[in-house]
Each structure stands twice: as structure tokens, then as C-alpha cells.
Amino acid sequence: MRDAYHEELDSIGDSLVEMARLVGSAIGRATTAMLDADLNLAESVIAADEKVDALQRDLETKAINLLARQQPVATDLRIVVTSLRMSADLERSGDLAQHVAKVARLRYPESAVPRDLHATILEMGQLAQRLMAKTGEILITKDVDLALQLEQDDDAIDLLHRTLFQHLMDDRWKHGIETAVDVTLLGRYYERFADHAVSVARRVVYLVTGDYADEVDPATAAAAAAGSEEAPAEEA
């Protein structure tokens, strides 16, 4: 009975990792679709978001069943509750990737992004994808140090987001209001995508240490992580 219980807990973790993989791929493909005006690729990203939604629904069902049947306590309860919150972040990340793809579809056969901003948007897309890849790694390894570093990586996205606004506010902007709206929305989508990746990483810190990320000393967190690897799972 206990083996089945812990298999279900592991299954919840596996679902989170798969969601992170899917949404990371989605933001990369959506970026390519938008910059290359690739309608087929955009449509595939939009359609694929249903798989992320299905994974979240399945995870929620498993989590609720565990809470109802097993009444987990201590670390196991923290795993279940935190996983529900992380799945919401990842599902929202998938929606944001889908939004990027929908902008690409809306402006087809043109690119929604002016040529002089392609490099900035491409870099935002690549950074967002890398952030989510690190988040997936953190979900697997429970690496608290890496989780705490992720917020610093997010600063690069924020800087690019500000760069976009500088272009939009420049008197030399010549691409019109419609394009300005598209670029404003796209910048926001990437910035929020990165925020959700950071949110998941911060929840991993809480999962491992029992403390919120901004309250954690890195040395203490490393010791807690080492202890969690050695200790057996909590009994419900």
C-alpha cells in the first residue's frame, strides 16, 4: 500500500517535469513561428497546449485523491500542496507560449516583429526557454542553489523587456500603433513566462527547506537539501 502511495507521489513529480519540458519547447517554437511567420508551426504550438492542460488536470486529480485517501502529513503534504501550485504556474506558462503563437497567426503572412527588433525578441525567447529548462532540472534534482540563482537569470529578461519599451517610446519609432501593441504584448508574455519559471523554482526551495526563497541562506539551504536526500520519505 505504501509503495503505491509513494509511486503516486513520484508520478506527480514526473508530471511537473513533463509540463516544464513541454512549455519550454512551446516558447521556443512559438518564437520561431513568430519571427519566421511560420503559420503551420504557430498552429502546432496552439494545438499542443491542450496536452499541458491535460497534464495539469491529471495532476490535480491525483493530488486531490491523495489528500482525500492518504491524508499526508509533514513533507508529503508539502509536496502535494506545492505541486498543485507549481502546476498552475506551468499551465500558465503554456498559455503564454500559446499567446505568442496566436500573435504569429494573427499577423501571418507578415512577421509581427519589425526586423530591427528580431534580435531582441529572439534573445527573449531563447532566455525564456533556457529558464524553463533550468526549472525542469531543478524539479528533478531539487537543487536549491540552482533554484536561488534562477532569479538572477530572470534579470536578463527584465532588462530586454525594458529595452523593448525604450524602442517603443523612441521618437524614431516608425512601425505604427498596431505593431507597437504587438511588441508590447509580446514583451509582457516573455517577461511573465520567465516569472512563472522563477516561481516554480522558488517553490522547490520551499519544498526542500520549508522556508520561502527570500528567507533562505544558501549555506543553510544546501545543508537542508543534503539532508532531504538522505532521509526517508515521511509516513502519512
Image (cartoon, rainbow, N blue to C red):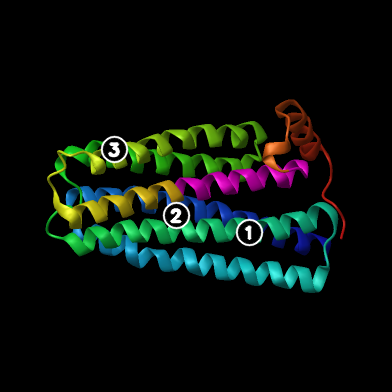
Per the model, the C-alpha gap separating discs 2 and 3 is: 32 Å
128 displayed left or right of 61: left
Relative image position of residue 227 (x, y in whole percent): 81, 35
- Identify the mark at residue 85; answer none if there is no mark: 1
Taking depth in this image into account, of 61 and 92 the one nearest to the observer is 92
* Tag in front: 3 or 1: 3
124 displayed left or right of 2: left
Dominant SS in magenta: helix
Is residue 33 visible in the rendered structure shown here? no
Query: Which residue is tagged 2?
Result: 22
Q: In which quarter of the image is residue 151?
A: top right
Image: 222 above or below 105: above
Looking at the rendered structure, the kind of residue marked 3 is Gln
Query: Which residue is tagged 3?
Result: 166
Relative image position of residue 123 (x, y in whole percent): 32, 37
Looking at the rendered structure, the kind of residue marked 1 is Arg
Magenta-tinted stretch: 193-211
Per the model, the C-alpha gap separating discs 1 and 2 is: 17 Å
What residue is at 16 percent from the left and 45 percent from the top?
114
Looking at the rendered structure, the kind of residue marked 2 is Leu
Per the model, the C-alpha gap separating discs 3 and 1 is: 34 Å
